[in-house]
């Protein structure tokens, strides 16, 4: 089962996250299948960028966004159809 979730990057007290596709049971910082975008919560305003085409592709293949990624997608209105996949 595939998951679309965030991988923590950056330095101490200066985190940023990559939105990645990876095996659902793997550790947070394990190897990713594909990097879809990034999220920088420390920027003002917070930056969230994602490749919509690739996101739709992976959701179509059965990848499910994590709760956090789904919330970011809804908040930034990136892909409402993809965000609904995490609801179940």
Image (spheres, rainbow, N blue to C red):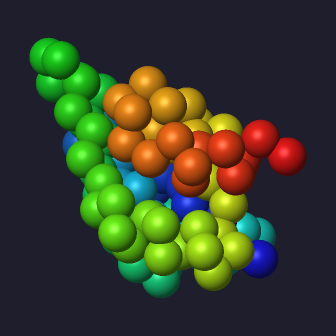
Residue that lies at the very extreme toward the front in this rendered image: 81
Q: Can see residue 12?
A: no
Q: Can see residue 11?
A: yes
Q: Is residue 44 above or below residue 85?
A: above
In percent of width and height, residue 87 lies at 77, 41
In percent of width and height, residue 58 lies at 53, 74
Residue that lies at the very extreme toward the top in this rendered image: 44
In percent of width and height, residue 2 lies at 68, 74
Residue 61 is left or right of residue 16, and the answer is: right
Q: Is residue 72 above or below residue 17?
A: above
Residue at 44 percent of width and 65 percent of height: 55
Residue at 21 percent of width and 33 percent of height: 47
* Displayed quadrant of residue 35: bottom left
* Displayed quadrant of residue 60: bottom right
Residue that lies at the very extreme toward the right in this rendered image: 88
Residue at 70 percent of width and 52 percent of height: 85
Q: How many marks on residues?
A: 0
In percent of width and height, residue 41 lies at 30, 27
Q: Report the quarter where the N terminus lies.
A: bottom right
Q: Nearer the viewer, residue 12 or 31?
A: 31
Q: Is residue 61 above or below residue 47?
A: below
Q: Nearer the viewer, residue 81 or 49?
A: 81
């Amino acid at each position: 089962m595939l998951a679309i979730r965030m991988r923590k990057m950056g330095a101490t007290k200066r985190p940023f996250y990559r939105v990645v596709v990876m095996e659902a049971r793997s550790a947070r910082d394990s190897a990713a299948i594909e990097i879809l975008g990034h999220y920088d919560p420390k920027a003002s305003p917070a930056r969230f960028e994602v490749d919509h085409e690739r996101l739709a592709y992976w959701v179509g293949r059965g990848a499910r966004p994590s709760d956090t990624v789904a919330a970011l997608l809804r908040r930034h209105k990136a892909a409402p159809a993809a965000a609904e996949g995490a609801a179940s």
